Image (cartoon, rainbow, N blue to C red):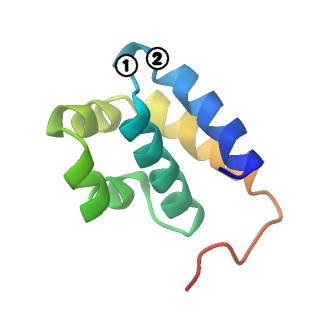
Amino acid sequence: MPERFARLVGAIQHLFEDMGVDVVEERVLNFILQEIHCGKTVEEALDEPYVVNNTKPAWRREILERPELIKAVEEEVDKTFEGRKGDCGK
């Protein structure tokens, strides 16, 4: 895992501690963060088939119901990818 993602995932995991993040959810979080970096909203990233297939509806719903998590995720993504473009493969 690239260092910038490791640091970002660590910060996000801290926010999700009470949700019991496991290895699969860590990978899903990485995917969500990459999708947000590439311009998607949190809602759009949560609707991606990879996320839907690897998480429970309650997990996704809890994220959407906690606006402080969404704001924190978006702020962490902005800080992590500040000045970086071209990681989207599109």
How many C-alpha atoms fall within 10 Å of the one at disc 2: few (<14), some, or many (≥20)? few
Outermost residue toward the bottom in this view? 90
Q: Element at badge 2?
A: helix
Q: Element at badge 1?
A: loop
The amino acid pointed to by label 1 is Gly
The residue tagged 2 is 17
Residue that appears at 57% across and 46% down: 74
Vertical comparison of 15 with 73: above or below: above
The quarter of the image holding the C terminus is: bottom right
Q: Quadrant of residue 65?
A: top left
Residues at circles 1 and 2 in contact by the CB criterion of under 8 Å = yes
How many C-alpha atoms fall within 10 Å of the one at disc 1: few (<14), some, or many (≥20)? few
Vertical comparison of 57 with 1: above or below: above
Residue that appears at 24% across and 63% down: 49
Vertical comparison of 46 with 38: above or below: above
Residue 42 or residue 5, whichever sits in front: 5
The picture places residue 81, in percent across and down from the top left corner, at 74, 57
The residue tagged 1 is 20
* Cα–Cα gap, marks 1 and 2: 6 Å
Vertical comparison of 65 with 52: above or below: above
Image side of residue 35 versus residue 86, left or right: left
The picture places residue 23, in percent across and down from the top left corner, at 42, 34
The picture places residue 61, in percent across and down from the top left corner, at 23, 36
Outermost residue toward the top in this view? 18
Residue that appears at 52% across and 59% down: 36
The amino acid pointed to by label 2 is Glu
Image side of residue 35 versus residue 79, left or right: left
